[in-house]
Image (cartoon, rainbow, N blue to C red):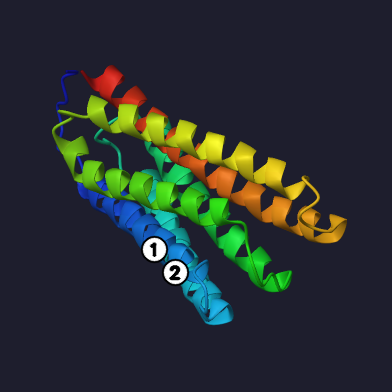
């Protein structure tokens, strides 16, 4: 552990935790949005509101980073972690927005399964953020999120194969593929968050 001679501002941890809690809420709303009979425009608006809150958290981290002399860990790692958390929410919001903009009525069942994986990874992420203070028992987190991202990859590939199997007309398949790509990007971004946490743990241990 590196020696710190001056007090550290620990409220960064609160910001990271708030951002991760937003991911759980966003994933929950997205899962609800993909169920039959959901009010998709209303839920997309709620997801957009969560995304705006996430932006505010990211901006708060950046303002604090610019005004704090001694940080709890490397400034570049704080910047990276904050932006990776924000990326996840951006991708989930984009997927929700496309579902509404494209007026998609029925989505392949794989999409809901991907979102369930996203929700599980988001829950893991929200649980680990407060533990950054002690930097203990973090390896199980990034191992599990990497496993979940691999699961999401497999489901994504099956979904794309279904899109081009002839079950959907060409235009609908292209619209659905756009949504699938945003969901896959969200899963990748959650793995990036886990990678950022691993980097911090290795540097600070």
Outermost residue on the right side: it is: 170
Could you say where residue 121 lies in the image, as x and y percent from the top left?
36, 44
Please name whichever residue, 55 or 46, is drawn nearer the observer in this view of the structure. Answer: 46
Is residue 199 visible to us here? yes
Mark sitting on residue 94: none
* Dot 2: element: helix
Point 58% across, 43% down: residue: 185
Q: Nearer the viewer, residue 30 or 151?
A: 151
Numbered-mark total = 2
Mark 1 vs mark 2, CA separation in Å: 6 Å
Eye-nearest disc, 1 or 2: 2
Please give the label number shown on residue 32. 2
Crowdedness near tag 2: few (<14), some (14–19) or many (≥20) residues, C-alpha within 10 Å? some
**Camera-side residue: 105 or 64?**
105
Identify the residue shown where x is 40% and y is 39%: 81
Q: Is residue 75 something that shows in the picture?
A: no
Quadrant of res 202:
top left
Quadrant containing the N terminus in the rendered view: top left
Q: Which mark is residue 28?
A: 1
Q: Is residue 75 above or below residue 95?
A: above
Q: Is residue 96 above or below residue 182?
A: below
Residue 188's x, y, as percent?
52, 37
Q: Left or right: 86 with respect to 199? A: right
Q: Tell me which residue sits at (50%, 39%) in the image.
A: 152
Residue 21: x and y, percent? 31, 57
| Above or below, comparing residue 92 to residue 201 in the picture | below
Q: Residue at x 66, y 55 (%)?
A: 179
Q: Is residue 152 left or right of residue 157?
A: left
**Residue count near mark 1 (Cα–Cα under 10 Å), binned few <14, some 14–19, many ≥20:** some
Quick one: quadrant of the C terminus?
A: top left
Circle 1/circle 2 CB separation < 8 Å: yes
């Amino acid at each position: 552990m590196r020696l710190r001679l001056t007090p550290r501002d620990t409220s960064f941890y609160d910001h990271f935790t708030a951002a991760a809690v937003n991911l759980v809420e966003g994933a929950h709303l997205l899962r609800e949005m993909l169920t039959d009979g959901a009010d998709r425009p209303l839920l997309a608006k709620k997801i957009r509101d969560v995304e705006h809150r996430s932006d505010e958290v990211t901006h708060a981290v950046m303002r604090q980073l610019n005004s704090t002399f001694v940080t709890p860990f490397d400034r570049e790692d704080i910047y990276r972690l904050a932006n990776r958390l924000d990326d996840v929410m951006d991708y989930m919001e984009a997927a929700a927005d496309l579902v509404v903009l494209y007026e998609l009525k029925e989505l392949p069942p794989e999409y809901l399964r991907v979102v369930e994986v996203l929700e599980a990874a988001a829950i893991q992420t929200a649980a680990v953020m407060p533990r950054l203070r002690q930097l203990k028992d973090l390896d199980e987190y990034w191992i599990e999120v990497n496993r979940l991202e691999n699961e999401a990859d497999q489901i994504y590939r099956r979904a794309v194969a279904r899109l081009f199997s002839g079950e959907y007309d060409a235009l609908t398949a292209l619209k659905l593929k756009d949504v699938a790509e945003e969901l896959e990007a969200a899963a990748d971004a959650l793995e990036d968050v886990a990678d950022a946490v691993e980097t911090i743990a290795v540097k600070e241990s």
